[in-house]
Amino acid sequence: MMYICRPCKATIGTHKDSKNNHPLGSLANEKLKKLRIRCHALIDPLWKTKKMKRKEVYLLLFEKTGVKHIGWAREKDCRRIIKYFEENYDTKIKG
């Protein structure tokens, strides 16, 4: 299930087990989707490789960028996230 804005083709998915189809964030066009995916590619390895707890990663995200959830981030927010994490963390998943 997803929401779509037909005129601009922006979309957002919903939580899988949501009875009310709650969105995962705000509508995003292709450019914004790519930026959000890049943000996740930078921060997710921190908790997936157990370098940090997931809560710690999202607290750091908020403290350093003012963003609580990537699904609600705007383009300028994503650029700020990308800049901070590229400059401060080696977040490449090995193997």
Image: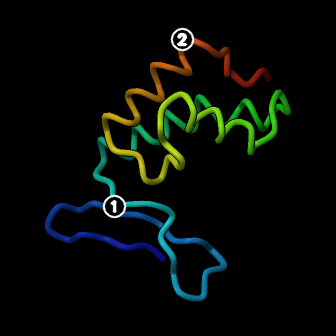
SS under mark 2: helix
| Residue depicted at x 51% and y 71% | 14
The C terminus - image quarter = top right
Residue 31 picture location, percent across and down: 29, 41
- Please, is residue 67 above or below residue 91 in the view? below
| Residue depicted at x 43% and y 53% | 72
User: Mark 1 — residue?
Assistant: 27
In three-dimensional space, the C-alpha distance between marks 1 and 2, rounded to whole angstroms, equals 28 Å
Identity, as a three-letter code, of the amino acid under mark 2: Glu
Labelled pair 1, 2 in contact (Cβ < 8 Å): no
On the image, which quarter does residue 53 sit in? top right
- Please, is residue 5 above or below residue 69 in the view? below
Residue 94 picture location, percent across and down: 77, 21
State the residue in front, 84 or 7.
Answer: 84
- Please, is residue 4 above or below residue 60 in the view? below
On the image, which quarter does residue 88 sit in? top right
On the image, which quarter does residue 58 sit in? top right
Please rate how many residues cluster around mark 1, counting C-alpha atoms within 10 Å: few if below 14, some from 14 to 19, many from 20: many
User: Mark 2 — residue?
Assistant: 87
State the residue lying farthest toward the right: 50
Residue 49 picture location, percent across and down: 82, 31
| Residue depicted at x 56% and y 21% | 85
For residue 51, the mark is: none
- The colour style of the image is rainbow
SS under mark 1: loop
Identity, as a three-letter code, of the amino acid under mark 1: Leu
> Left or right of 19: which side holds 67?
left
- Which is more N-terminal, label 2 or label 1? 1
State the residue in front, 17 or 84.
Answer: 84
- Please, is residue 8 above or below residue 3 in the view? above
